[in-house]
Image: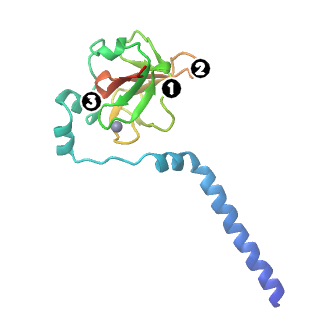
Amino acid sequence: MDQTKRHFLHLLGAGAVLAMAGASSLMTGAGNVMAATITKLKLSDAEWRKRLSPARYNILRKEGTERAFSSPLDKEKRVGTFHCAGCDLALFDSETKFDSRTGWPSFFQALSGHVETKTDFKLIFPRTEYHCARCGGHQGHIFNDGPKPTGKRYCNNGLALTFKPKSA
Ligand SMILES: [Zn+2]
């Protein structure tokens, strides 16, 4: 092989590697954006027990569910934001809250990148569990019977949230 041809092949190879790198960063783009903006909070089980009330610990760290109609946040109608009760990350804007009549605070959209989901099989049918993207604290489950524009219903435990009214 002469020198020119070898050089050309070398360039081709480098181009292909670059193209692949570009494609893979596009594919994982959404996940990367979130990872870049939210620093994970990792605490030991003992630290969580110290930090949270037993009722909040049971929901946030053990995926418990509070009794329907037990949370005052179900009736919260002021303008503001709902934050994770474990780490204070803002999860929902009051503009996305609606009365689902289920007895749990319900939202049709979470703040972008601030919740993560997984599938759980605690009941017979699979459900979409969601949790705080920073501390991993369990919040609730997502159902597909919500209102427009998303059609989603984020069914949230009130004890997993704190409400911060918008200061006038
Ligand atoms: Zn959190």
Q: Residue 163, image x and y in percent?
A: 35, 23
The disc, 3 or 1, on the residue closer to the chain's N-terminal end is 3
**Badge 1 element:** loop
Q: Which mark is residue 109?
A: 1
* Nearest to the observer: residue 129 or residue 112: 112
**Badge 3 element:** helix
Q: Residue 44, image x and y in percent?
A: 22, 48
Q: Residue 78, image x and y in percent?
A: 41, 14
> What's under tag 1, amino acid-wise?
Gln
Sort mark 2 into few (<14), some (14-19) or many (20+) by Cα contacts within 10 Å: few
Q: Is the CB atom of the residue marked by disc 3 within 8 angstroms of ligand 1's nearest atom?
A: no
Q: CA distance from mark 1 to mark 2?
A: 9 Å
Give the quadrant of residue 142.
top left
Q: Residue 77, image x and y in percent?
A: 41, 12
In the displayed structure, 84 sits above or below 102; it is below
Q: Which residue does the image show at 36% across and 24% down from the upper left?
A: 164
Query: Residue reaching furthest bottom?
Result: 2
* Nearest to the observer: residue 166 or residue 111: 166
**Badge 2 element:** loop
Q: Is the CB atom of the residue marked by disc 2 within 8 angstroms of ligand 1's nearest atom?
A: no
Q: CA distance from mark 2 to mark 3?
A: 29 Å
Q: Which mark is residue 59?
A: 3
Sort mark 3 into few (<14), some (14-19) or many (20+) by Cα contacts within 10 Å: many
Q: Quadrant of the C terminus?
A: top left
- Give the labeled residue for mark 2: 149
* Nearest to the observer: residue 133 or residue 68: 133
> What's under tag 2, amino acid-wise?
Pro
Q: Which residue does the image show at 33% across and 46% down from the upper left?
A: 41
